[in-house]
Amino acid sequence: MNPIIGIVSKHYTKDSLRPDTYIRDEVKQAIFDNGGVCIGILPPDSDIKRITDYWNYDLSKNEYENLITQIKLCDGIIIQGGSCSDNYECIIAKYCYDNDIPILGICCGQNIMVRALGGTTKNVLDV
């Protein structure tokens, strides 16, 4: 049976009126090309909750359960790269860590994993 890999979708806004969610084609295609099946892990709401090193469990019980239900369908999770981190991505990373679910963070996704476990990140240009 082919592994099911969940790709955590990212928020994106072209304007301040309507956020969209997206999954990068190269991430999806890499899973398909290597025999996997991919599904999108969708954010629990349309609010963009950008974070830095500090995050919290700000989801309602229903939103949290919906997110966890999506994760439980997967054999592994990928947190995509991007220019910012969203709170729900940290919740996902922490859940995966606590429940021994394989997780891969790409670029910003790696920073999200660090933050989810209580670490801090620094911009190399600021060091």
Image (spheres, rainbow, N blue to C red):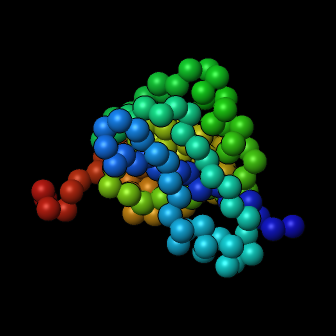
Residue at point 60% right, 67% down?
Answer: 28
Q: Is residue 91 above or below residue 96?
A: above
Residue 120 rendering spot, x and y as whole percentages: 31, 46
The residue lying toward the viewer, choosing from 119 and 69, is 69
Q: Nearer the viewer, residue 104 or 44?
A: 44
Q: Is residue 21 above or below residue 107?
A: above
Q: Quadrant of residue 81?
A: bottom left
Side of 121 relative to 32 (left or right): left
The spot of residue 69 in percent (x, y) is 72, 37
| Position above or below: 77 against 45 | below
Q: Is residue 63 left or right of residue 36?
A: left
Q: Is residue 114 visible?
A: no
Q: Is residue 68 left or right of residue 120?
A: right
Residue 92 occupies quadrant = top right
Position of residue 63 measured from the top left corner of the image (x, y, whole percent): 60, 27
In which quadrant is the N terminus drawn?
bottom right
Residue 43 appears in the rendering: yes
Pick the front one: 7 or 75: 7
Q: Is residue 64 left or right of residue 87?
A: right
User: Residue at position x 50%, y 64% from top?
Assistant: 24
Q: Residue furthest right?
A: 1
Number of marks? 0
Q: Quadrant of the C terminus?
A: bottom left
**Residue ID at (49%, 38%):** 88
Residue shown at 12% from the left, 56% from the top: 126
Q: Residue 18: where, in percent of width, then height?
A: 40, 38
- Extreme left residue here? 126
